[in-house]
Amino acid sequence: MKILSCDWGTSNFRLYLLESKNLACLGQVSSPAGVGVLRRQIEEQGVEATPFFLSFLQEQVERLAQQVEENLTGIPLFISGMASSSIGIFELPYAQLPFSIIGEDLVYHKIEPNASFSHAIYLFSGLQSPADVMRGEETQVIGMQNNISAADAIFILPGTHAKHIRIQAGKIVDFSTFMTGELFQLTSQRSILSHSVESRPIDDQEAISYFKQGVTLMKTGNYLETLFQARTNTLLKGFSPTQNYCFLSGIHIGYELTAMQKLSAATQIVICAGDSLALLYRTALNSLGITNKTYVIPNHQSKMATSFGHLAMLSQLITD
């Protein structure tokens, strides 16, 4: 059985051809045409949203068919992310907590194939807590469920808006959003601090030492007050712009992870990120004195988490 798996966020689009028997990815295409980008085009052109989105999807499926040299007609398409939001193809209500990580609580909508689009579309909604929302990350958790070895765990999904997802006894019971990536970008590129920082990979001992300095200050420090040290480091301590960049990154990741300081020792931490970012999160946890058992999902698995989630739901949905 093959499926098309789509991870469609606000800013980016990714489409995969998957083979379920061997959990194999047979091909993939991507585009910067996220849901938000296409919605702006729809509003500018004054056209109907659903046909516009389906036309774009058809173009991407054809790109993928050319890449794999295969006729993909009729293969079902699973979509997670912002496509089910108010700016997407069809707005769906959020699923509610507690939420089973095997996918049985998902809210979804099936769009039947037609003459212009031959694929049945399974459009998945997001998840809502009393104080927060997410779309897409719940599918990633379903795809990574086999990586949980404890009854109580927290998934960390770093990013522009990082997610901490609490899982107990096979259900998501709570989650929180941290604007870590967005605030780091704003402070490093658009604030007064931008004159004191210069981007560089944080991938050697020197860079990590300055990163850890920023993290450590967040143990008891005030985020807003500590930020300005990225300015005074240059004026008073002779930090270079690249050293300050590492320091500022440490402040942001460290501040995010202070939420982990009150965890029970029995709670497992699962980090789903690329290798370099996973290293920074593990380093920050250690610098904050957080000693919970921590597992890092390998890079190739974390990249495919949404697709693995779609494959996990295949048997539940394809008979609909």
Image: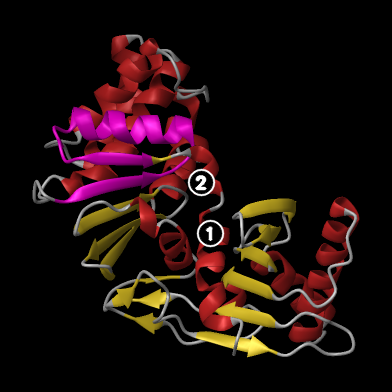
Magenta stretch holds residue 115: no
Work out whether residue 230 or residue 156 is closer to the camera in this orientation and state it.
156
For image coordinates 36% across by 31% down, the residue present is 280
Above or below for 301 versus 35: above
* Residue ID at (21%, 67%): 169
Image quadrant assignment for residue 164: bottom left
- In three-dimensional space, the C-alpha distance between marks 2 and 1, rounded to whole angstroms, equals 8 Å
Residue 246 in view here: yes
* Label placed on residue 230: none
First in sequence, mark 2 or 1: give its number.
Answer: 2
**Magenta stretch, residue numbers:** 267-296
Contact between labelled residues 1 and 2, with CB atoms less than 8 Å apart: yes
Badge 1, how many Cα within 10 Å: few under 14, some, many 20+?
many
Q: Quadrant of residue 281?
A: top left
Between 40 and 284, the one nearer to me in the picture:
284
Residue beneath disc 1: 308
The C terminus: image quadrant: bottom right
Q: Which residue is mark 2?
A: 301
Amino acid type at circle 2 is Gln
Residue 283 in the image: state x and y as whole percent.
29, 28
Whole-percent x and y of residue 116? 89, 84
User: Mark 1 falls on what kind of element?
Assistant: helix
Viewer-side residue, 72 vs 282: 72
Residue 61 picture location, percent across and down: 82, 65
Relative to residue 43, is residue 281 depicted above or below?
above
The number of numbered discs placed on residues in the rendered structure image is: 2
Task: Judge left or right: residue 64 versus residue 79.
Answer: right
Residue in view at x 42 percent, y 67 percent: 138
Q: Looking at the picture, which amino acid does disc 1 mark?
A: Phe
The N terminus lies in quadrant: bottom right
Identified at 65% across, 65% down, the residue is 5
